[in-house]
Image: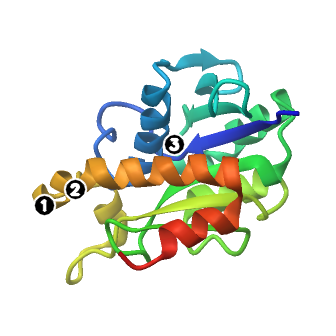
Amino acid sequence: MTSTWLVVGLGNPGPRYEATRHNIGQMVVDELASRRGETFREHKGGARVVETWLRPGADKLVLAKPNTFMNVSGTPVAALARFYSVPPEQVIVVHDELDIPFDTVKLKIGGGHGGHNGVRDVARAIATPDFPRVRVGIGRPPGRQDAADWVLAPFGKDERANLPILVDDAADAVELLVSDGLLAAQQKHHAPR
């Protein structure tokens, strides 16, 4: 029997933010949609969505990019979870993570928000912090640069060269989390390279 997973890529709407570090979650769900030859469409839940499958005959995936700004991502996530009857343990949130080095993917379920306002708002809106997270490392800003400026800036030249690999790894992590569970995904993606 198959079930439905809601995979949400956090970010900010509009072309101004498309290529910024804060939007790497949306880049990952774009990659998942691209792998399946799908395009996003507007949903009444306040997001752009793709309804697809992990693979034919497997679990259903609802890929989503909220139309709201990062700090108020929770309302559309909660609306989509209700619409598709997805329990919190099957709401995967893909987001940028300052405390993880660039080019690194980590997975966890639950815990704090680590100062990430998008994650905080999702936990508030779905009334639990206990949802799976695919945390895509963007690293801390150099020197005294403000973290808010860092996440809203485009990736640097060296980062852009490796960005497709990082996005691909994070998309692989989402697929493995759905197909084989958290532990298998952690063992693969947390292992030293």
Q: Position of residue 158 (x, y in %)?
A: 13, 61
For the question of whether residue 106 can be seen, the reply is: no
Q: Looking at this rendering, what residue extends furthest in the bottom direction?
A: 143
In the rendered image, which quarter contains the N terminus?
Answer: top right
Residue shown at the point (83%, 61%) measured from the top left: 128
* Label 2 residue SS: helix
Residue shown at the point (27%, 74%) measured from the top left: 141
Q: Position of residue 185 (x, y in %)?
A: 60, 62
Q: Looking at this rendering, what residue extends furthest in the left direction?
A: 157
The disc at residue 158 is 1
The disc at residue 91 is none
Q: Are marks 3 and 2 in contact (CB under 8 Å)?
A: no
69 displayed left or right of 98: right
Name the colouring of the figure. Answer: rainbow
Q: Which three-letter amino acid code belongs to the residue tagged 2?
A: Asn
Vertical relation: 127 (above or below) 8: below
Q: Which three-letter amino acid code belongs to the residue tagged 1?
A: Asp
151 displayed left or right of 114: left
Mark 3 vs mark 1, CA separation in Å: 27 Å
Q: Tell us which disc is closer to us: 1 or 2.
A: 2
- In this view of the protein, which residue sits in the foreground, 179 or 167? 179
Q: Earlier in the sequence, mark 3 or mark 2?
A: 3
Q: Which three-letter amino acid code belongs to the residue tagged 3?
A: Phe
Residue shown at the point (67%, 32%) measured from the top left: 61
Mark 3 vs mark 2, CA separation in Å: 26 Å
For label 3, the residue is: 69
Mark 1 vs mark 2, CA separation in Å: 7 Å
Q: Residues within 10 Å of mark 3 (few under 14, many from 20)?
A: some
Q: Residues within 10 Å of mark 1 (few under 14, many from 20)?
A: few
Which of the 4 quarters of the picture holds residue 78? Answer: top right
For label 2, the residue is: 162
